[in-house]
């Protein structure tokens, strides 16, 4: 009988059920982290050869930028967090391009170039007190491109790649400006 009473007490204990939920959430988060990590390391190198079209209709691969530190940024014209990040990317491009760095913007709009090209031509962003256009290469992406980078969980998604093609950092959501600039400086 005491064992049954103890089992009922444990079952009805709200702290016990919260611990189970917390443990379960931790396990799910850990599994997702491992899954994303596996995709990223599996995708390393696979993304270098995937072909994308620039807004000028030339074919570009990430491998074309080997020897440079590249911040690949998946974004869309309708994505509000992407628009928050664009001025930071413009600033990074201006600050580090001469040292062997580039941002590569991969626009993921379903409509492709007909929507992306006018957006890039028209939009200006406040950077250090001045209105500036996007000053880095923009290509049009699709699901095939995204899969080569390990898939996307949302926009923006950024992947920092070393001069020799290794993935240094992957961020889903807004990048941390300070941490990203430090990583870029360390990779240069």
Image: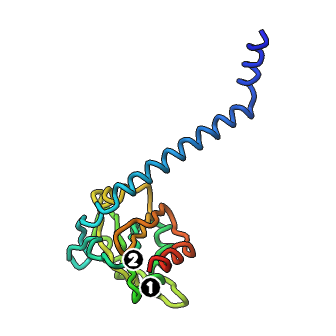
- Which of the 4 image quadrants contains residue 167? bottom left
Residue 116 placed where, x, y %? 32, 72
User: In the drawing, does residue 35 fall left or right of residue 108?
Assistant: right
* Residue placed most toward the observer, 178 or 54: 178
| Quadrant of the image containing the C terminus | bottom left
Q: Is residue 30 above or below residue 146?
A: above
Residue 77 placed where, x, y %? 39, 69
How far apart, in angstroms, are the residues tagged by discs 1 and 2? 9 Å
Circle 1 residue = 96
Disc 2 packing (10 Å; few <14; some 14–19; many ≥20): many
Q: Residue at x 26, y 75 (%)?
A: 64
Secondary structure category for the residue under label 2: strand
Q: Is residue 61 visible?
A: yes
Disc 1 packing (10 Å; few <14; some 14–19; many ≥20): some
Q: Is residue 101 above or below residue 24?
A: below
Q: Are marks 1 and 2 in contact (CB under 8 Å)?
A: yes
* Residue placed most toward the observer, 185 or 175: 185
């Amino acid at each position: 009988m005491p064992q049954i009473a103890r089992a009922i007490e444990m079952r009805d204990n709200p702290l016990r059920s919260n611990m189970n939920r917390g443990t379960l959430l931790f396990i799910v988060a850990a599994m997702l982290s491992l899954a994303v990590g596996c995709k990223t390391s599996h995708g390393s190198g696979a993304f270098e050869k995937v072909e994308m079209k620039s807004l000028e209709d030339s074919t570009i691969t990430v491998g074309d930028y080997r020897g440079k530190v590249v911040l690949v940024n998946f974004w869309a014209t309708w994505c509000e967090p992407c628009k928050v990040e664009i001025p930071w990317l413009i600033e990074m491009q201006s600050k580090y391009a001469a040292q062997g760095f580039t941002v590569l913007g991969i626009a993921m709009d379903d409509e492709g170039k007909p929507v992306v090209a006018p957006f890039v031509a028209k939009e200006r962003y406040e950077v250090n007190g001045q209105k500036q256009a996007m000053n880095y290469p923009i290509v049009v992406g699709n699901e095939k491109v995204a899969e080569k980078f390990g898939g996307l969980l949302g926009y923006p998604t950024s992947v920092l790649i070393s001069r020799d093609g290794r993935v240094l950092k992957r961020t889903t959501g807004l990048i941390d400006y300070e941490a990203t600039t430090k990583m870029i400086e360390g990779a240069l």
